[in-house]
Amino acid sequence: MPDHKLTLISHALCPFVQRAAIVLLEKGVPFERIDVDLKAKPDWFLAISPTGKVPLLKVARPDGPDVVLFESVAICEYLDETQSSPLLLPADPITRSQHRAWIEYGSGVLADAWQFLNAKDVPTAQSKGAAFRGHLSRLEQLQGFGPYFGGATFGLVDAVFAPIFRYFDVLPDAVGAPLFEGLPKMSGWRQALKIRPSVAQAVGIDYGDRFKRYLFENGAILH
Ligand SMILES: N[C@@H](CCC(=O)N[C@@H](CS)C(=O)NCC(=O)O)C(=O)O
């Protein structure tokens, strides 16, 4: 699909945007990235985003009108189906279904991580941290990990978990240590994702500082 110009409409801190950026980088597809201010959404953005959320993927087609895709998983699957290898979802229907289910599971893990990180009081941080660790403990029981979710090959499940684990890489070790302690597969997975070039390149170099400033400005106790 070399003639289709792709634009990822983004926000610098959004974990859902990172999923799509990681897929584009894994596929080696050129794309333009436009960040929008989600606190003052521009009219052009509201006109094309059904949910008012990022990411959006604008697909400019030489043989038809531009199309705007929304919802990160739908965008990632579109890219996986239309761009060249490597395929990021397995070809086998059973395994593909399992990976889709773990992607959905990943959105729940992200919600717990987000609420933990943004907690404004200790009881909330404790309960959300316990929920996050509980989710990771369940994943820890799976067979076949290493270094990535599906084994040797990086896939879409990895693209979903990489932005979650990144939070703990930019914060002091003491934040993540109790959550990952005693979970060797999760710790190894986190490390493998951290050094994957597509994961590293999916955010700007100022990501860590911006994220910590965001927590501070939002009154999170962890900042
Ligand atoms: N289910 C959506 C979630 C996207 C989402 O929540 N994006 C956030 C930024 S990380 C957003 O645009 N929020 C703006 C708003 O809710 O007004 C997806 O997977 O794309």
Image (tube, helix red, strand yellow):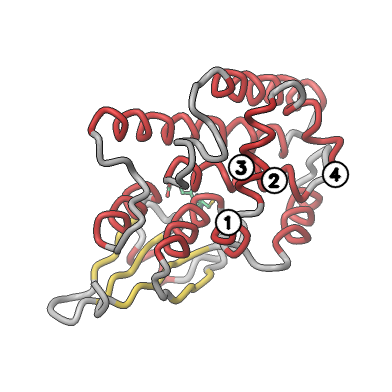
Circle 1 sits in a helix, a strand or a loop, which is it? helix
Mark number for residue 167?
2
Nearer the viewer's eye, disc 4 or disc 1? 1
**137 vs 171: above or below:** above
Which mark, residue 164?
Answer: 3
- Determine contact: label 4, label 2, CB under 8 Å: no
Which residue is label 1 attached to? 199
Is mark 3 in CB contact (under 8 Å) with mark 2? yes
Say which residue appears at 55% left-offset and 50% top-offset: 15
Which quadrant does the C terminus fall into? top right
- Cα separation between marks 4 and 3: 15 Å
Label 1 to label 2: alpha-carbon separation: 12 Å
Going by the image, does 3 lie left or right of 30? Answer: left
Identify which residue is drawn at 14% across, 76% down: 64
Dot placed on the residue nearer the N-terminal end, 4 or 3: 3
**Residue picked out by circle 4:** 172
Q: Earlier in the sequence, mark 1 or mark 3?
A: 3
Residue 1 image-quadrant placement: bottom left
Residue type at numbered disc 2: Tyr
Q: Quadrant of residue 153?
A: top left
Find residue 213 and name its label. none
Identify the amino acid type marked 3.
Ile
Q: Amino acid at mark 1?
A: Val
What residue appears at the point 73 percent right and 42 percent down from the top-left corner? 168
Of 68 and 199, which appears nearest the observer?
A: 199
Indicate the amino acid at tag 4: Pro
